[in-house]
Structure formats: structure tokens, C-alpha cells
Amino acid sequence: QLHLVESGGGLVQPGGSLRLSCAASGTIRSINTMAWYRQFPGKQRELVADISRDGTTNYADSVKGRFTISRDNAHRTAYLQMNSLEPSDTAVYYCNVDAFNRFAVRGNYWGQGTQVTVSS
């Protein structure tokens, strides 16, 4: 089983920055793609950014040039650096991981979510 613990959310003024972290733990064989999603009230979760094991990244158009996703494979941690935050970025942010457990069974896992609020 894989557990994801997110941190780094909070309240920030427009134009400010936040850094989200997602740490994976548990008996897992390998982690493939790590991603960040966000969910606005009353809407479905949408992809913000993802990063493959080899470091290839993908971003939603709305965050390109402002957000940066990265990962530390040795520590099984993903990060989302968010700069130039806008009120429209206010949402609950979720970490998502695609991984193989110790029995080589592939699974998809979600974190508990962390609130990001951009407001003056």
C-alpha cells in the first residue's frame, strides 16, 4: 500500500508563491508518473502538471510559465512550485501517483488534498 502526504498549502496574496510537497511512503517497488491535480468547488479535478520518472514534464496551459513540477526519486517526493499566483488558482490541490507495489501490481493513488487560497 502507498500513502501520500501533502503539505505546503495555505493563504497567499496575489502575485505570491507557494511550494507544495507530496511524500510517498509504503511498500512499493517503483513510482512512475507523479502529478498534481486541482479541484474547484463544484467542478471535477483537473490536471495541473505531471512528471515522469525520467523527468519529462507536462503542464496545463493555465499554469505554464508560473508553476514548476519536480521530483526527488530518492525520497519519493514530488513538488509543485507555484509562482505569480492568481485568485483563479484558488482550489484544493491533490497529489496523484502511479506506482507498482511490491507484488508488481500497478495502482493509482491520491493524496488527501491541500487547500490553496489566493486572496488579498
Image: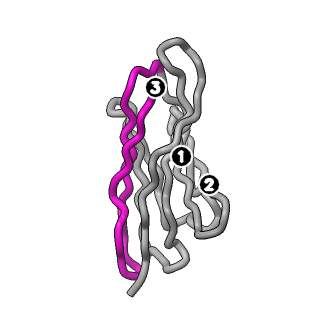
Q: Quadrant of residue 56?
A: top right
Amino acid type, label 3:
Gln
Instruction: Residue under label 1, please give it.
Output: 35
Main SS class of the magenta portion in the image:
strand
Disc on the earlier residue, 3 or 2: 3
What label does residue 1 carry, if any? Answer: 3
Distance of label 3 from label 2 (alpha carbons): 23 Å
Amino acid type, label 2:
Leu
Disc on the earlier residue, 1 or 2: 1
- x and y percent of residue 93 in the render? 49, 58
The span shown in magenta is 1-29
Label 2: how many Cα within 10 Å (few below 14, some 14–19, many 20+) = some
Vertical placement of residue 47 versus 23, above or below: below
Q: Is residue 16 left or right of residue 103?
A: left
Which circle, 3 or 2, is nearer the viewer?
A: 3
Q: At 35% from the left edge and 68% from the top edge, which residue is drawn? A: 10
Magenta stretch holds residue 14: yes
Distance of label 3 from label 1 (alpha carbons): 18 Å
